[in-house]
């Protein structure tokens, strides 16, 4: 169900890379004939809540020495993976598992 209650209301990605909401004809650039401000605002509020929850999770991680260490491991391992260096599989899986638990605790989508 859409936030506006209109069963014809849809979502697309505009040429700008942002989500667009509305009904009617969708032009080739991803914009609707009849834009829906209600759904756009509802999406904005939902994304803002996720952003705030993610910020709370990061603040909690940085304030805890143990969690801060975990965050450093994840950042280093991600950097290694990006640079083509093989990450330590055991350390990486333990860090990812802990990170997923924290994300679940704070209600953050990963």
Image: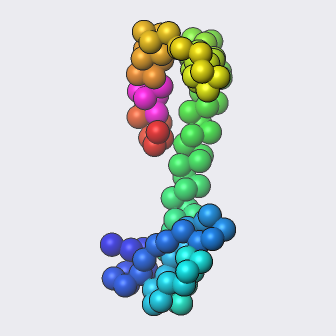
Provide residue 9's location: percent of width, then percent of height. 41, 81
Image quadrant in which you'd find residue 2: bottom left
For this rendering, which residue is in front, 50 or 20?
20
**Residue in the picture at 55% in, 42% down:** 53
Image quadrant in which you'd find residue 80: top right
Is the stretch drawn in magenta largely helix, strand or loop? helix
Image quadrant in which you'd find residue 61: top right
**Above/below status of 69 relative to 79:** above
For this rendering, which residue is in front, 30 or 103?
30
Identify the image quadrant of the N terminus.
bottom left
Provide residue 33's location: percent of width, then percent of height. 53, 90
**Above/below status of 35 relative to 74:** below
Magenta segment boundaries in residue numbering: 99-103
For this rendering, which residue is in front, 63 or 18?
18
**Residue in the picture at 37% in, 81% down:** 5
Q: Is residue 68 visible?
A: no
Residue ranking furthest to the front: 84
Q: Is residue 11 visible?
A: yes
């Amino acid at each position: 169900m859409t936030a506006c209650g209109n069963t014809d209301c849809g979502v697309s990605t505009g040429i700008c890379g942002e989500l667009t909401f509305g009904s009617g004809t969708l032009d080739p650039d991803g914009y609707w004939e009849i834009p829906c401000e209600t759904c756009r605002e509802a999406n904005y509020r939902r994304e803002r809540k996720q952003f705030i929850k993610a910020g709370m999770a990061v603040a909690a991680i940085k304030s805890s020495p143990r969690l801060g260490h975990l965050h450093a491991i994840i950042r280093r391992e991600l950097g290694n993976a990006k640079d083509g260096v093989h990450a330590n599989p055991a350390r990486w899986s333990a860090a990812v598992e802990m990170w997923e638990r924290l994300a679940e605790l704070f209600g953050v989508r990963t």
